Image: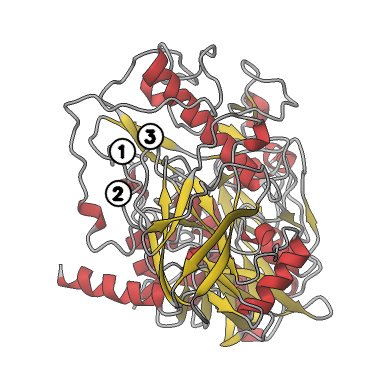
Amino acid sequence: MFVLRVYAAVLLTCLLIDYRPIVAADDDGLVLIETESFAETGGWVVDQQFMDQMGSPYLLAHGLGEPVADAVTKITFPAAGSYRVWVRTRDWVAPWNAPGAPGRFKISFDNEPVDTVFGTEGAAWHWQDGGEVQLNDRVEIRLHDLAGFDGRCDAILLSADPDFVPPDDGDALRRLRSRLLGWDQDPIDAGTYDLVVVGGGFAGSCAAIAAARLDLSVALIQDRPVLGGNGSSEVRVWPEGESRVEPYPEVGRVVDELSPSASIKLHPDPKGPLAFDDRHKTQLAMAESNLDLFLQHRVNAAEHDNNHIVSVTAQHTRSGQRKRFTARWFLDSTGDGVLGALVGADYEYAAQGHMGTTNLWSIGETTANEHQIRCLCDDDDPLSINFVASQAAQPFPRCPWAVDMSQIAFPGRDGKAAFGAPGINQLGNWFWESGFNKDIIEDGEWIRDLNLRAMFGAWDTLKNIDGKYPNHRLKWAAFIGGKRESRRLMGDVVLTANDFRDKTVFEDAAFPCSWHIDIHSPHPEYFESDSGDAYFSTFTRGKEFRYQGPYWAPYRCLYSRNIDNLFMAGRDISVSQSGLGPVRVMRTGGVMGEIVAMAASICKAHDCTPRDVYQSHLDELKQCMTQGIPAHD
């Protein structure tokens, strides 16, 4: 227990070392407060998923129908006086013209609430006018959630000039933020590394740990407070994919350390936090002396010259502090190909007709839900939490703004089964999926919100129309989307589904694939194939989508064809859209990360490019694959 407490304290220091409240004032009487930097977020959560489109993260009241605890901070004003209040927010169900404005919240200054109820107007993010208030020079500010249904607040702007109206559009708003917050200043120098890994899912975490063990200096940059990506407790997608198979049975050691497949499959609740154990993943990374871990940092800028990456800049998602990382080699393991897009790497991207995003959810016969639990990595003893079984009815409010499921025989209703599983097991499963014909990146918030509307609509129907599960409540729901498809960065080989079917042999076969050619699309029982509002999916099946596995895919899928020091690992590697199906699962991505680490060590030894590893040092890579990644010292 002493070791766990020491580890928790070290990790908490790691997470908060860059924290400082984002508050800025200027000579014109403007005071800007970024809500993600509130000293106490209470039950609100920091949502960074859409900060590239919005300019910053925001706070989300993800309460599953129960108002969350207040977010609180204290600030010092340039002077006491009268200020006009502007709050950057939106009515998140307005894109569907849905009634009810579920994301309602209020703001108070020194326990005096502003009359305006926020989050009640506008489909787009905008500054909602809160009127004028009289403030002291030292003020406590509270965000008070009114409904528990995903209210959101990006920033608060206070103006001594009552006639000032802040800009809503992207460029003008960015200039205002940059001027007030100093985000146009040079970032802090975070150091120089052999390898900078951008993205801390399975692929990036395995790559960083493996590279550190091969004596590379590594920075691992992850924009959430936990590692694991889709395989973390925040998203809870089941890790799949074989490792440690012939002819290279040592490939996959780190994957098995990160995700011990034998023990994880014995866990009785695959959506429970124990099955994903964020602490274990972070502890593995922090144990490596050659690895510097930067959680809660999002890479949103990069320098490149003549098809060569010089540095990346990452912004802390709580403090806004920006850091510049230089390196000889870089790995894009973001899933979205974020770094590749920033530096002009060749990529393919299906703007429509692609796989969707899932926000998993679960119900339980319990007296409490999980929205109040802090991130597993900074709770003192998170894995000991037990929920008390409910002996009384757990009411749930009506949701007129949700998807109307009253006339739909959705999976889990009246014994309706999908893919062979009965009843309650259908609720919140992988096929509650949306966004097939939306832009995966630009429309990411819309996609996530449709998933939430479908969830709330189904639960409202079951509880309030069908009268089912009286003692159950929504126990947990992911607000972080589990994506399946996004940008695919192009390498010297673009792997296709036919390569799997035809068993194409590549001389640089480097990582095993065992998942079938699994492509999702709108479920035809519920939606047309081109439906923009589909929220149930099906998957490809039949002999043409199976192959004899494991199939060893080529190393040449793991580096960029036009950026000479960029590796890829995970679902953003060089595959066609049909070829994405077998490679996109997490344990397979983790093995890719190990191969990238081996290749990066060869690059360091020979001062060469990732392409040179294939062209001049392939036998050396195969020798590394035979030996595998060494265990931690």
> What x and y, as percent, mark residue 347?
78, 56
Sooner in the amino-acid sequence: mark 2 or mark 1: 1
Q: Is residue 131 left or right of residue 426?
A: right
Q: Give me the disc on residue 274.
A: 2
Q: Is residue 70 left or right of residue 446?
A: left
Crowding near pointer 1: few (<14 within 10 Å), some, many (20+)?
A: few
Crowding near pointer 2: few (<14 within 10 Å), some, many (20+)?
A: some
Residue type beneath disc 1: Asp
Q: Nearer the viewer, mark 3 or mark 2?
A: 3
Question: CA–CA distance between discs 3 and 2?
Answer: 15 Å
Sooner in the amino-acid sequence: mark 3 or mark 1: 1
Q: Which residue is tagged 1?
A: 269
Crowding near pointer 3: few (<14 within 10 Å), some, many (20+)?
A: many
Kindly state the secondary structure of the residue where label 2 is placed.
helix
Residue type beneath disc 3: Ser
The C terminus: image quadrant: bottom left
Where residue 580 sits, quadrant-wise, is top right
Against 36, residue 546 (above or below) is above
> What x and y, as percent, mark residue 90?
60, 47
Residue type beneath disc 2: Leu
Kindly state the secondary structure of the residue where label 3 is placed.
strand
At x 28%, y 41%, the residue is: 267
Question: CA–CA distance between discs 3 and 1?
Answer: 10 Å
At x 57%, y 39%, the residue is: 449
Between 82 and 619, the one lying in front of the other is 82
The N terminus: image quadrant: bottom left
Q: Which residue is tagged 3?
A: 362
Q: Nearer the viewer, mark 3 or mark 1?
A: 3
In this orientation, does residue 269 appear?
yes
Against 254, residue 589 (above or below) is above
Question: CA–CA distance between discs 2 and 1?
Answer: 8 Å
